[in-house]
Amino acid sequence: MGKPNITFRLYAITGENYHPGRSMVSVMEQAIRGGADIIQLRAKDTSKRELLAQAYALRELTRRYDVPLLINDHIDVALAAEADGVHLGQEDLPLAEARRILGEDRIIGISTHNIAQALEAQAGGADYIGVGPVYPTGTKPGRQAVTTDYVREAAAQVRIPFVAIGGITLDNVDAVLEAGATRICAVSAIVGSDQPAETARAFKQRIRAYNAHGASASSLKQVLINGRQEWTDAVTIAGLVEQYGLGAKRIVVELNGVILAREAWLHTSVDEGAKLELVHFVGGG
Ligand SMILES: Cc1ncc(COP(=O)(O)OP(=O)(O)O)c(N)n1
Ligand SMILES: Cc1ncsc1CCOP(=O)(O)O
Ligand SMILES: [Mg+2]
């Protein structure tokens, strides 16, 4: 089977209390459409039966969009629903036990609150770590914020992917990215938004603007993608398609009104003001 790809940038976690009257699946679908590229099912006060039902529903959704699904806390539910992995905290089952049960093909993420925990999780074979809560948050009330100081430490010392989490909104995400985070996770800011897709898209853009390849603002070009103004540092169409996580997918690219053959993507540059349509064919049903 092999471990699923975990080159994510925007991690969205469920939080049903934040969207009364809207279904979890539709809210998470909007988050994915906006650019969330990994999803976690987290429901702290739900029966295991209900959690499993939610996991099945999200499994169907995430398969359709080819996005990894992780289950918070519950390895048995992750296995039963054939999820891609689990997220575990410092008080959950230890990493070594989880790895023994889940094997190498499943993703295991570990919450950390200081650099010692981060290095321990890294040495123990975690696939990624959570760094937080960066800011105080109503989603985990009473937890002490680790501040962007810990994000800075993680950026300097951690060699596996790390994702910043906790109280992150569009108003403070730049400070988190400035501190060195290249992956952002949010619950309330995304699922509590009236427009989860728009919010996810805005997060994704900010992440890209500071992106991992060390893009400086001056290398960014403004382009129109599917009718939206976006910033990119991609040099070629192939690079841009990759940045949008669409490299392995069935898509058609139209550049300035002309369909571009896949063979030409690598040799066609992305110019300031380019107008692109990226049409992604979603598989399944
Ligand atoms: C990506 C991510 N990071 C941190 C957490 C928190 O996990 P934990 O500390 O076990 O707390 P609970 O979420 O179980 O309340 C997370 N879930 N995801
Ligand atoms: C689950 C979790 N772990 C650390 S902070 C947090 C909650 C993040 O939620 P929000 O994005 O709403 O602050
Ligand atoms: Mg936990």
Image (tube, helix red, strand yellow):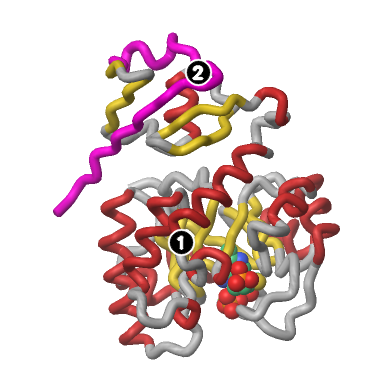
Residue 182 falls in which quadrant of the image?
Answer: top right
* Circle 2 residue: 270
- From mark 1 to mark 2, how far is it between C-alphas? 28 Å
Q: Which residues are magenta?
A: 260-285
Q: Is residue 164 magenta?
A: no
Residue 264, image x, y percentages: 36, 11
Residue 109, image x, y percentages: 56, 61
For this rendering, which residue is in front, 109 or 8?
Answer: 8
Q: At 45% from the left edge and 62% from the top edge, which residue is drawn?
A: 195
Q: Is residue 96 visible?
A: no
**Hey, what amino acid is under mark 2?**
Val
- Under tag 2, what secondary structure? loop
Q: Residues within 10 Å of mark 1 (few under 14, many from 20)?
A: many
Q: Is residue 234 visible?
A: yes
**Hey, what amino acid is under mark 1?**
Pro
* Circle 1 residue: 196
Residue 206 appears left or right of 61 = right
Residue 230, image x, y percentages: 53, 35
Q: Residues within 10 Å of mark 2 (few under 14, many from 20)?
A: many
